[in-house]
Image (spheres, helix red, strand yellow):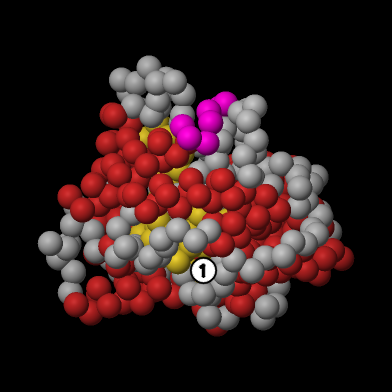
Amino acid sequence: MDAPLTPELKAELKRIAEAIVADGKGILAADESTGTMGKRLANIGVENTEENRRLYRQLLFTSGKEMSNAISGVILFHETVYQKADDGTPFVRLLRDQGIIPGIKVDKGVVVLAGTDAGETTTQGLDGLGERCAQYKKDGCDFAKWRCVLKITDYTPSELAMKENANVLARYASICQQNGLVPIVEPEVLCDGDHTLERAQKVTEAVLSATYKALMDHHIYLEGTLLKPNMVTAGQSCPTKYTPEQCAQATVTALARTVPPAMPGVTFLSGGQSEEQATIHLNAINQYQGKKPWKLTFSFGRALQASALKAWSGKSGCVKAGQEEFLKRAKANGQAAMGKYAGGQSLAGDQSLFVANHQY
């Protein structure tokens, strides 16, 4: 049985989920925490103030009507939900007026999972989540995101870590749906390490299997959810180099073995890949001819923003340049979501965006 949701609420959740994964569209993940945004700004010599964070998010959200051609939803951080553009328009309304669905990051970050030898983690934030979700829905958000993190070593992820994180994701999903938010379920298998593509595929399959077992146990309405997984790639330090086509086959195979067809869409995270690499891999995944009952698109943060940040560099006279770079990457990934990307150039296209043991 599904969670105790009314037919009307189920229909709304399904509508929102399907709109987010509309053909050729994906998600801009602009939900960096204050600390993480500070690191991004520091890289371009900009002070980490609320006003500078607002100015940067405004640059993205006002980039032009072309944005909505490729961006269906934007994940916001709490601060950003309540910020406004220079003309006084709330960012949430600004996005909705463009036909873009606002979403919200609701987890409170990862913490060490006691009893694990390798310092494995779980994610906190369930306390008070129902009240927060109800308020975010009232304030204009229609979907949410919650990230769990699992790391590949010779001995991890452990059974404990996989089950704990799967249950946390299921509890989050249930609370979101009861409050009218589509939950994006994000069990990220990190690419840190020297593991092979085959090992990454095996672990990803185990993690996704545990996740969907928990979602079913908690009676989640799958048609009103989305999945945000890692693409299956070898570890950053793996000496063997695999082609995008090999990664695509591993990724689609892992999904086909574990993800129910009822779930409408997969919105991949970029996992520290460069902008161009993430786009090429997404394109290869969509060109792969294996069974794909779900839409396969993007939910990128750094892989949509690196060139835009570099072009802007905090200078008021460079806002247009930053917007042009952002739109360029959005268009490229929209094409890749259809398997039609033919390559392109951007300021930071080949720059590595990998951060070891990446946490918000």
| Residue at screen point 19% across, 77% down | 7
Q: Is residue 194 above or below residue 52?
A: above
Residue 236 can be seen, yes or no: yes
Q: Is residue 65 left or right of residue 155?
A: right
As drawn, which residue projects farthest toward the front?
289
Residue under numbered circle 1: 73
Q: Residue at x 28, y 42 (%)?
A: 210
Queried whether the magenta region covers residue 293, the answer comes back as no
Mark 1 closeness class: few <14, some 14–19, many ≥20 residues within 10 Å: many
Q: Between residues 350 and 143, which one lies in front from this camera angle?
A: 350
Residue 265 in view, yes or no: no
| Magenta highlight range | 191-199
Picture quadrant where residue 290 is located = bottom left
Q: Is disc 1 placed on a helix, strand or loop? A: strand
Instruction: Locate residue 298 relative to residue 45 in the image: left or right.
Output: left
Where residue 272 appears, as percent x and y from the top left, is 62, 43
Question: Percent from the top left, x then y, of residue 74?
Answer: 53, 65
x and y, in percent, of residue 146 in the image: 40, 50
Tag 1: amino acid: Gly
Say which residue appears at 59% left-offset and 57% top-offset.
284
Q: Quadrant of residue 5?
A: bottom left
Instruction: Tell me residue 322's x, y (percent).
Output: 78, 63
**Is the residue 113 above or below the residue 188 in the image?**
above
